[in-house]
Amino acid sequence: MNETQPYEVVVVGGGPAGLQAALTLGRMHRRVLLFDSGEYRNDPADRMHNFVTHDSRPPAEFRALARADLAAYDTVEVRDEAVVSVVPDGDGYLVGTDSGPVATRLVLLATGVRDTLPDTPGLAPLFGTVAAHCPFCHGHEYAGRPVGVLGTGPHAARMVAMLAPIASEVVVLADGADVDDETAAAVARFGASVRPEPVAGFCRSSLGATVSFDGGSDSEVGGVLVVTAFAQSAPFAGELGLTLLGSGCVEVDVMGRTSRAGVFAAGDLAHAASLPMPMASVLGAAAAGQTAAAGCLFELISAPAPVAVPA
């Protein structure tokens, strides 16, 4: 690749959204540089699910296969390096790293989000295996076993309904909070139960996890569904002044365009305003990466860069 010319697109993030974006642009013979910091939202998960042909594949294996795909395209470069800044520079951007800045016409952010779990003792070591936040991605793995739903927020009734055909029983772990009418109705309708006591902690067991309660006997479950709080993994959205939605994610249109010209976003860090939150799955992130890459291509061909003509 000619280092004297700016890249057409720099992709920031080496998860499924960034990898797919680089592949899509590489297949269109566009000069692409992908930066991968080596940190991923699904690091705690030992397996990824609900992705046709990749169901139950370890995330690291998926990324290795994707890297092998990218290696076939001469216009795609991958660097295992973290990005430290993204700043406007004339008609394009300078993407800063510890080894120096890189010029690019367009930037595609695929840096994801960072999950924060409730501070219940023992929950963090279970997250990604026994405990999870997405029934689509992990619910089937708890089939035929009792499953706990931690908390009584708006998620609880929906989780009970989704897990009822999968689990042997569903237990709402109220953790000392009141159960609202919607959750109470779902509990009754789907034959679930409620443990009202505060949850003292979790401990791994042969079935999955033992739940300890303040003022009540222990209970054993095969899985725990929990809602996480999440925030942007990287500061670039804020530094670039991108419009954020109530979810904390970057607002994008149907082609992955952000509120700033020349900046696209894909994956868990972004979604359209018509959705309450991103569809947090590997397949969904990859699909968003492909769409945003197509958006980048359309912008490139609508205002092509000058081509040097040999004398």
Image (cartoon, rainbow, N blue to C red):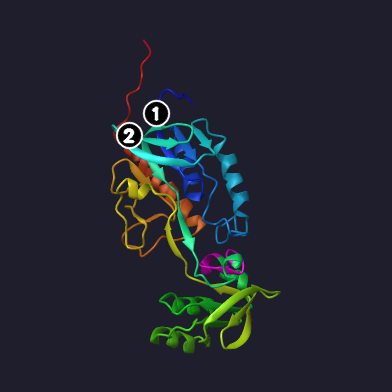
At which x and y percent is residue 140?
A: 59, 70
At which x and y percent is residue 297?
A: 37, 39
Q: Can the viewer see residue 68 in this picture?
A: yes
Numbered badge on residue 6:
1
At which x and y percent is residue 58?
A: 63, 55
Pick the front one: 16 or 45:
45
The vertical placement of 163 against 2, above or below, is below
Question: Which residue is at a point 52% across and 36% down the rendered structure image?
Answer: 78
Pick the front one: 31 or 197:
197
Question: Which residue is at a point 61% across and 65% down the rendered structure image?
Answer: 125
Image-based side of 104 in relation to 115, left or right: left
- Residue 246: which quarter of the image? bottom left
For badge 2, the amino acid type reads: Gly
Please state the extent of the stretch shown in magenta in the rendering.
127-137
For badge 1, the amino acid type reads: Pro
At which x and y percent is residue 97?
A: 46, 36
Q: Residues within 10 Å of mark 2 (few under 14, many from 20)?
A: many
Q: CB atoms at circles 2 and 1 under 8 Å apart?
A: yes
The vertical placement of 158 against 73, above or below, is below
Image-based side of 142 in relation to 198, left or right: right
- Residue 200: which quarter of the image? bottom right
Is residue 113 a member of the stretch shown in magenta? no
Which of the two labelled residues, at mark 2 and mark 1, occupies the earlier sequence position? 1
Q: Secondary structure at mark 2?
A: strand
Q: Residues within 10 Å of mark 1 (few under 14, many from 20)?
A: some
Question: Which residue is at a point 32% across and 24% down the rendered structure image?
Answer: 306
Q: Secondary structure at mark 1?
A: loop
- Disc 2 marks which residue? 92
Image-based side of 25 in relation to 193, left or right: left
